[in-house]
Image: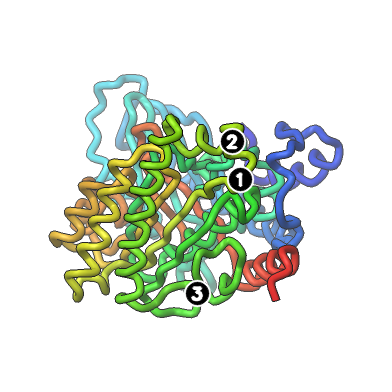
Amino acid sequence: MITLLQTIKNLKSNFRKNRFKYESSQLNDYIFPTDLFTDNQELAEERYLKAEKLSQQIQEDLWQLLPLLFKNIIFIDKTINTRNSLFKYKFKNVDVVLDTRKLEKELIEALHIQNISIARNGYTLEISIPHTDFDQDDEINTFAVPIDNRKVFENVRLEKKTEYIIGVSQENEVIKGNMDSNQKSMLLTGDGGTGKTNWFHQILLTMMAHNNPDDIKFYIMDFKRSTDYLMYNDLPYMLENPIYDIEIAEKTFNFISEKIEQRRKLFSENEVQDIDEYNNKEDTLKINKLPRWIIFVDEYAPLNIDSTSTNALIALLKKINRSEGVGIHLFISTSIVRKTNLLDEIKFYIDKQTTLKLSSLTASQISIDKPCAETLLNHGDMLIEITDNLNRIQNLYISDNEIRKITNYLKDKYDVS
């Protein structure tokens, strides 16, 4: 298995020598240059060495503890990723009885490290332990090995125009999503400050990196009324500048619902099944293609105070759910995770659910129908279902300065005055 340090050290030299496993392709000929991302390779190497030293001590401590609890257990592997060290063990007997919650509590008490998470799959036991720094005053702080956004973008192969970067796995692999007919909508939950808006930025930048404004268009609705999306004002990718007003959002939801019906009628008249088939028709090539529309609703909770806007959102979600291949996709986020009729309806019609850290086991069960989101770390530590399995992913951190550089570059490129 390639370690994170090997990845950090080898990416630059391997890419220069054209020996990296992903060769250059037209799909990776990005719309904006990747050097607009900050180069943090030096910091990543420094943090990795620190994490490696700590993980070695933890590995020794675990080997003192685990054989006392389980007689027939052997060490398999260790992976150091951006937020955790992942230790893998194997039971010689699959019949070993294990209460993962109890073991988590025992290890937290023994190691004095919070947010330890454990997963059991047959013979295999995986223990994920955050990178933790104990200073001289006995203060305990977690730290991260930063992800080099530039290298991630340079060395991931985006084979389809609908693909985007989800994040980096526990095994240090870049994980991609695909806005195809199986992912028309997604719900993202997570406490305030855990990285929901940052993940939306990540998707926005990924899609703009390998699509021009004729390919995709965005609506951004920010009911937090923050300044997080000001950089997207006047971008040619935007159908409108970010929307903050609930009444305007309601009208926009209704407008998008009408557009879905118009597209369905258009496809029927042209005897095609989806947006790709329509755009590839010879007649279509002579006129304007239909762009995909991606709608981001950042914090839907304020809609609860207005029933008409709530109904408009649910009506749109139903249409998207029932409309195959129209090329309109919806991402919704919230930090208010409690059982309500609105959340129940959203979960019923949504294609995929994902979550960042939540404050309680109850919130985790409401969000993803199982416990474990309460053990995640802050700042981009995510659980997402991929091919029927719940995967733990770390999002990229994209700074305001990086977003500003990229959006300004795109405005200049497309001559937005």
Q: CA distance from mark 1 to mark 2?
A: 7 Å
Crowding around mark 2 (Cα neighbors within 10 Å: few <14, some 14 to 19, many 20+) is: few
Q: In the rendered view, does 9 fall on the left or right side of 236?
A: right
Mark 3 highlights which residue?
A: 228
Q: What residue is at 23 percent from the left and 54 percent from the top? A: 346
Give the foreground label among 1 and 3: 1
Mark 1 highlights which residue?
A: 287
Amino acid type at mark 3: Asp
Figure quadrant of residue 11: top right
Q: Compare residues 235 and 30 and report the one nearer the observer.
A: 235
Location of residue 228 in the rendering, given as x and y in whole percent from the top left corner: 50, 74
> Split into 4 quadrants, where in the image is the C terminus?
bottom right
Q: What residue is at 42 percent from the left and 37 percent from the top? A: 267
Location of residue 268 in the rendering, given as x and y in whole percent from the top left corner: 38, 35
Whichever of labels 1 and 3 marks the residue nearer the N terminus, that label is: 3
Give the foreground label among 2 and 3: 2
Q: Label 1: state its secondary structure.
A: loop
Q: Kindly tell me whether residue 65 is visible in this rendering.
A: no
Mark 2 highlights which residue?
A: 283
Crowding around mark 1 (Cα neighbors within 10 Å: few <14, some 14 to 19, many 20+) is: few
Q: Residue furthest top?
A: 93
* Residue 398 versus residue 171 in the image, above or below: below
Amino acid type at mark 2: Asp
Q: Compare residues 291 and 198 and report the one nearer the observer.
A: 291
